[in-house]
């Protein structure tokens, strides 16, 4: 028994040590330059496990723009003015799903899409409570 442990322990140690040498090298974010007469809005959804397979649709001033997927970054250029950003108005997501921004030419704004998932009762079936939040 001790021989088996003495044989397996160094192997586990080597595997753990080799895992330390692997790194996640991610390129740094660099904002795109402003275009004359337009405002730039970055919409990003961080990588999270809650609601990872759900991609709510983004509407800007009641017009469908695109689905916001997990770990996705989106660049939107808009003329100056007031805009309402909304995640799937027909769904009953809880959280802050509507955001109004007044955009100026040459301005850069960032909107993060956060999400959470809550289970109200595990003993009797109730649907999950999905939440999405638009955060500036």
Image: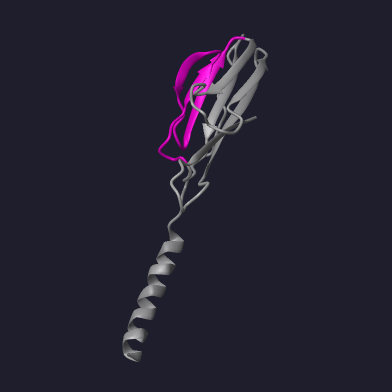
**117 over 3 or under it: above or below:** above
Residue for point 58% across, 14% down = 35
Q: Is residue 54 magenta?
A: yes
Percent x, y for residue 55?
43, 31
**125 over 94 or under it: above or below:** below
Q: Quadrant of residue 33?
A: top right
Total tally of numbered discs in the picture: 0
Between residue 87 and residue 72, name the one nearer to us. 87
Left-right relation of 6 to 96: left
Percent x, y for residue 5?
36, 85
Percent x, y for residue 126?
46, 43
Image quarter hosting the C terminus: top right
Q: Is residue 41 magenta?
A: no
Image quarter hosting the N terminus: bottom left
Percent x, y for residue 13?
41, 74
- Asked if residue 33 can be seen in this view, the reply is no
Residue for point 56% across, 32% down = 30
- Asked if residue 101 can be seen in this view, the reply is yes
- Colouring rule applied to residues: one colour
**78 over 15 or under it: above or below:** above
Q: Quadrant of residue 38?
A: top right
Range of residues picked out in magenta: 51-79
The residue lying furthest to the front in this view is 124
Between residue 119 and residue 105, name the one nearer to us. 119
């Amino acid at each position: 028994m001790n021989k088996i442990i003495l044989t397996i322990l160094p192997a586990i140690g080597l595997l753990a040590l080799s895992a330390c040498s692997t790194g996640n090298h991610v390129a740094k974010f660099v904002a795109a330059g402003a275009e004359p007469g337009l405002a730039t809005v970055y919409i990003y959804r961080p990588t999270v496990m809650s609601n990872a397979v759900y991609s709510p649709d983004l509407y800007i001033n009641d017009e469908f723009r695109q689905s916001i997927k997990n770990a996705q970054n989106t660049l939107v250029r808009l003329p100056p003015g007031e805009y309402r950003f909304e995640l799937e108005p027909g769904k009953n997501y809880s959280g802050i799903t509507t955001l109004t921004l007044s955009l100026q030419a040459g301005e850069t704004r960032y909107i993060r899409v956060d999400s959470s998932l809550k289970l109200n009762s595990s003993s009797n079936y109730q649907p999950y409570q999905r939440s999405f939040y638009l955060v500036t």
